[in-house]
Amino acid sequence: MNNNQPINKPSFALTTPLYYVNGLPHIGSAYTTMIADAIARWYRLSGHPVMFVTGTDEHGQKIQRTAEQNGIPPQEHCDTIVHSFQDLWQKLDIQYDSFTRTSADKHEIIVKEFFQRVSEQGDIYLSQQQGWYCVGCEEFKEERELEEDKHCPIHTNQKVEWRDEENYFFRLSRYQQQLEELYESNPEFIQPQSRRNEVMNFVKQGLQDFSISRINVSWGFPIPDDPKHTIYVWFDALLGYVTALLEEEDEVTLENAIKKWYPFNLHLIGKDILRFHAVYWPAMLLSAGLALPKQVFGHGFLTKDGRKMGKSLGNTLDPFELVDKYGSDAIRYYFLKEVDLGEDGDFNEIRFINKVNADLANDLGNLLNRSRGMLKKYCTNIFPSINEVNIDADNPVKQIAMVLPKHIREAYSSYNFNFLFTNILTLISNCNKYIDDSKPWALFKNGDQKEVEIILYVVLESVRFSAFALAPIIPKISNKIYHQLGYEFDFNNKELGSKIPISEEHWQWGQLNINPNLPEAEPIFAKLQLDYDNNNKKP
RNA sequence: GGCAGCGUAGCAUAAUUGGCUAAUGCACUGGGCUCAUAACCCGGAGGAUAUUGGUUCGACUCCAAUCGCUGUCACCA
């Protein structure tokens, strides 16, 4: 077997949004990032070169004012918040390949070059923008959406301000037809389907140009040749994806940025910012003559105990607290399994604990633990030298297992995590049933050693396969399982999947080689306990 | 208000183009087993599939109305 055969698969580039640094990271940002990380990990493990981009969006009047209130320069404010994002990503085992910040020097160069290109197309012009402006939202409001006393409905604590100013506009209206053709000829471009319909309806109604500059905002990039204007947040922020692709040693040019990974295969976003990614962004790229991303996926929102989360309701879910309390794997597992990507999903602490304990401790963890126990008792120093070929085709577990790799790949490549978990849990549950039905303890007493060995092989291999398939979701647990089976694997090693024996062979069922020197059996996932004290504190 | 979508056991989800007794997991409950993390296995209970009417040999599925919920209707990372 050639262990060093390189593989050559198409690359995959994906992004999360660049998160706005007006506050500490919230659970919604964590949710998006966990999904993106799982997708990125799956592609890497399957042998694809991956570029996973995340980062922060740092400009705008809102940041400027927050910093002023705290008596610090905006850059300092951003640095602090950015650290907390990076800290959280580390706690959640997020493996990004590029972390991009819109306050970076090189980003300014990219933005200016892009602006220049769009400008040369005649897609930028100066005009007058009048209206009520909410600094909190950083946008103009229609009279009808305001509360009676001129307060913004979202930021009820501050009045909107009347603005009458010159703004630069982007000629979005010019791209209506091209966008419609894009949606029509690429049905997968906007996912899920329901959101595609919304966007298409929106575009069909006609597109207005949108303003891309502000005056009296110092925290941002000046418009080339007209420095009293600052480039507005969207034009700036979306381009952060492109800046992220620059290599350290590259001269900072648009051409260099897009030379390797561009265009993106996937922009994973929350449904609130779908329009910017599915309408404005492709139009901007069309104008600049750049290729379009393959897909924009707008996922749903999270609720807590069935209610919207919000500071005013005081029911936010703090991701730092959650990960400190329960660990990254449990959280990653729950949010990917129990929330249907695309739909809104709910977090309920009791259900969270029940599900995670049932699946990871009772079913999967205990399955490994009980079979490791039997291996020790029944196969002392006689380790089964069995492989897939020795196992009857009508073995109930093998029958299920042999078709799994295909389903797992389908599930990952279509982001159908429900399907993924259903398949794995069916395998695990059938292994538990298989043990109970075939009673290896009785076979052992009868002296049917070979039978016992086959049963244990089938089960342990199924656990291995499950660990491999779930490694993009629960890397720590998968590491522990592999360790228990005698492999020294690190699923946090980004290079792991880049060799054929891993990315191809381990995806198959029937690969297990039981190492005679197994470590002591120990539980791979301790059951979570509901924190009663903390829970009772809350009304 | 216009447009779009949704309503299935306590909870979360399934049911190819209408077709076996509406399925699965969690939670609940009776039993079994002993290899195991009080685990696992078998069984049970729990449903007018939101309501009403219609089409059909047959409706969770199609049609209509009603009630309830959600999204969207221009610049909310």
Image (spheres, helix red, strand yellow):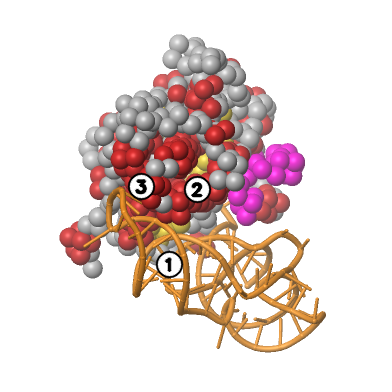
Discs 1 and 3 lie in a common subunit: yes
SS for dot 3: helix
| Relative to A328, residue A353 above or below | below
Q: Residue at x 31, y 26 (%)?
A: A517
Estimate the spatial distance between the alpha carbons at disc 1 and disc 3, rounded to whole Å.
Answer: 83 Å
The x and y percentages for residue A106 are 45, 20
Q: Position of residue B48 (x, y in %)?
A: 57, 82
Marks 2 and 3: same chain?
yes
Chain letter for mark 2, please. Answer: A
Residue count near mark 1 (Cα–Cα under 10 Å), binned few <14, some 14–19, many ≥20: few
A192 in the magenta segment? yes
Q: Which residue is mark 3?
A: A445
Q: Chain of mark 3?
A: A
Mark 2 or 3: the one toward you: 3
Q: Which residue is mark 2?
A: A427
Of mark 1 and mark 3, the one earlier in the sequence is 1
Say which of marks 2 and 1 sits in front: 2
Q: Please determine whether, in this image, residue A405 is positioned above or below residue A351.
A: above
Amino acid on which the number 1 mark rests in the picture: Glu
- The amino acid type of the residue labelled 3 equals Lys
Which numbered dot is residue A148? 1
Given residues A493 and B57, the one toward you in this image is: B57
Disc 1, SS: loop
